[in-house]
């Protein structure tokens, strides 16, 4: 990124290295990085991270107009996919023609990929809390799918946990096997600046657009998770977590414990806001026990998402995980 926060060529090419799950997106970002005109368009996007909302906005528009030539390169939209080597001209034409709409969508939507497979890391971390029963709060909840983490079935390389469910989350174990146990969630609250209402077709379409075109399994899992989440009682609150979290905690029954989860959301917080969140939770701990679970990828020297947990101000690293839950690497001796 440039000092002004605009996406430049170096930033895009670095982002491209982590888009190995989508040959199409790797090619589109390379085309954008090498085009001053396209760089100027993506530079008008202020939401973070710009490549994600830029590509999702394009995907979203193509879902509404699947007959345009560019749609032929999207596995999510056609059955006979064009070779990615020919995408440059239709991509440039579509983006330039629709640039104002793309920028508008990207600047008014959020990167709210509700990838419930990340629960393969979050759920073992929640179970590492000292609580048998607790209220669950999800910061940056999107559509609230992670609030249903105990309703999914897990397969950790043959170690299974959970009820029968249309959502089966599997993950490769690269470290200690997860320590699984029975717990009880007393209530579920999700907080987001822009809660996604999955009963709204357009909102569901945006969630779908955030899934990369080739990731058919993720897309099917998203739809199944939406169905599971619809069966649980949860309270999704729209607002700034720094403004509403204190009141939510104060309104819970006195003496009850709380687990607060955040995943892939702190990158959208300013540094001072991250400190404010820690201070806010610290103040609430004077009145009740609170355990935190944090799965983020905000380290400048290491792209891997890191999983941290703790009941105090300073969290302890439990391990690392793949961005979309393909694998987890836990180390309980760090606790």
Image (tube, rainbow, N blue to C red):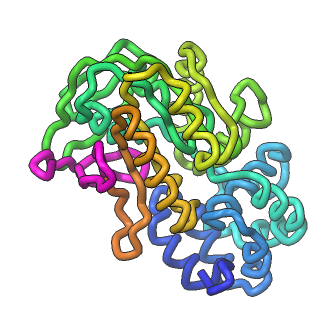
Relative image position of residue 280 (x, y in whole percent):
49, 49
- Determine whether 216 is above or below 307 in the image: above
Closer-to-camera residue (248/176): 248
Magenta highlight range: 308-335
Closer-to-camera residue (22/168): 168
Q: Residue at the spot x=63%, y=86% of the render?
A: 3
Q: Quadrant of the N terminus?
A: bottom right
255 sits to left or right of 5: left
- Determine whether 37 is above or below 302 in the image: below
Q: Quadrant of residue 184?
A: top left
- Determine whether 78 is above or below 95 in the image: above
28 sits to left or right of 215: right
**Residue 331, can we see it?**
yes
202 sits to left or right of 85: right
Q: Residue at the spot x=87%, y=60% of the render?
A: 101
Q: Quadrant of residue 310?
A: top left
């Amino acid at each position: 990124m440039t000092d002004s926060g605009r996406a430049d060529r170096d930033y895009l090419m670095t982002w491209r290295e982590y888009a190995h799950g989508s040959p199409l997106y790797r090619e589109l970002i390379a085309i954008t990085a090498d085009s001053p005109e396209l760089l100027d368009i993506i530079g008008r996007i202020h939401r973070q991270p710009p490549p994600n909302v830029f590509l999702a906005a394009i995907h979203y528009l193509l879902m509404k107009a699947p007959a345009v030539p560019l749609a032929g390169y999207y596995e999510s939209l056609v059955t006979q996919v064009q070779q990615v080597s020919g995408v440059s001209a239709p991509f440039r034409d579509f983006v330039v023609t629709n640039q104002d709409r793309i920028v508008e969508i990207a600047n008014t939507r959020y990167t709210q990929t509700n990838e419930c497979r990340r629960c393969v890391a979050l759920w073992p971390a929640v179970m590492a809390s000292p609580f048998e029963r607790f209220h669950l709060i999800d910061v940056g909840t999107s559509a609230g799918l992670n609030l249903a983490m105990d309703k999914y079935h897990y397969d950790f390389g043959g170690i299974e946990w959970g009820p029968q469910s249309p959502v089966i989350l599997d993950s490769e174990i690269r470290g200690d096997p997860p320590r699984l146990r029975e717990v009880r969630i007393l209530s579920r609250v999700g907080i987001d600046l822009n809660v996604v209402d999955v009963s709204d077709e357009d909102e569901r379409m945006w969630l779908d657009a955030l899934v990369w075109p080739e990731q058919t399994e993720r897309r099917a899992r998203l739809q199944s998770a939406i169905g599971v989440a619809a069966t649980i009682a949860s309270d999704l609150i729209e607002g700034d977590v720094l403004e509403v979290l204190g009141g939510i905690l104060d309104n819970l029954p006195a003496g009850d414990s709380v687990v607060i989860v955040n995943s892939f959301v702190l990158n959208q917080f300013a540094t001072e806001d991250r400190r404010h969140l820690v201070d806010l939770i610290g103040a609430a701990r004077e009145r009740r026990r609170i355990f935190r679970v944090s799965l983020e990828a905000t380290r400048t020297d290491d792209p891997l998402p890191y999983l941290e947990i703790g009941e105090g101000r300073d969290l302890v690293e439990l391990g690392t995980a793949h961005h979309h839950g393909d694998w987890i690497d836990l180390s309980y001796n760090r606790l």
